[in-house]
Amino acid sequence: MGNPKIAIITGAARGIGAATVRRFADEGYVAIGLDVLDAEAALPEGAEHFLCDVADEGRVAAIVKDVLARHGRIDVLVNVAGKVLVKPITETDWAEFRSIADINIGGTFLMLKHVIPAMKAQNGGVIVNMGSVSGHVGQIDHALYGATKGAVMAMCRALAWELAPYNIRINSVSPGSVDTPMLRGDIAIESAATGLPFEEVKRMREGEQALGRWAEPEEIASAVWFLANDEAGFITGADLKVDCGWTAR
């Protein structure tokens, strides 16, 4: 067998990121997880882990350099790292705006900036960015979060043409409601605001889904895996909505 392919996944400590690292490791990749939190406990044996704030360009550049020095290439980049802000825009301060923009847009930009040159040099690679249904439809108190995810999807469309001459594909996945700490945090905020028990609010939000449930992180990881492998070789500049029909209503 030849050398295994190399995949870098950000936001790897929990939720969709952790599930994506596990999926790529199961498929035989060297899966390298990045997160500002210690992700080692969430990652499978053999996966690599780096502590990394994706909004820190020096740290991002150093990690990419290290990966290339040891492995010689980067075949797949999956940008999952992100944060949500549930707040009316008139109550949002500048520091909160900068924080969500720096991570959701800035972190994606920095990973792209430092990984793309390696993919160009090897004449190939695949990038999958994490969008969201919030980038497609309006959601109360999610204006900034939706704006950042819309920006990520716009970057994908532009880069699809920019990178095509180098045999690099780039797409995004837009999850709907996924059972992650981020979504549970949203439910906790709604529970506190309404006075309703957490589990009651959760059941209400699950009932809004066409299939009456939230997705598991592994289901989003499967969508990422599909876009990253050769069976999706004619797909670039696309957004794959994994939203249980949310945007089809």
Image (cartoon, rainbow, N blue to C red):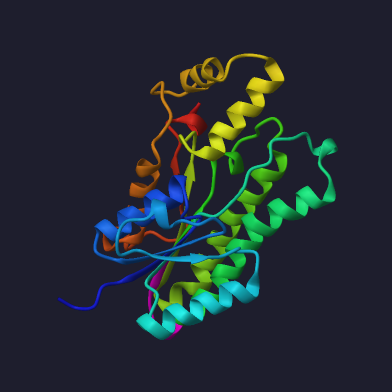
* Vertical relation: 86 (above or below) 36: above
**Residue 178: x %, y % from top left:** 46, 36
- The boundaries of the magenta stretch are 120-126
Going by the image, does 17 lie left or right of 218? right
* Vertical relation: 187 (above or below) 203: below
* Vertical relation: 222 (above or below) 48: above
**Residue 116: x %, y % from top left:** 50, 76
- Snapshot quadrant of residue 22: bottom left
**Residue 90: x %, y % from top left:** 85, 37
Q: Residue at x 43, y 29 (%)?
A: 214
Q: Residue at x 55, y 76 (%)?
A: 114
Judge whether residue 119 can be spotted in this image. no
Is residue 124 inside the magenta stretch? Answer: yes
Going by the image, does 98 lie left or right of 207? right
> Quick one: quadrant of the N terminus?
bottom left
Judge whether residue 40 can be spotted in this image. yes
Is residue 237 inside the magenta stretch? Answer: no
**Residue 88: x %, y % from top left:** 78, 34
Q: Residue at x 46, y 34 (%)?
A: 179
Which of 100/228 is in front? Answer: 100
Q: Residue furthest left?
A: 1
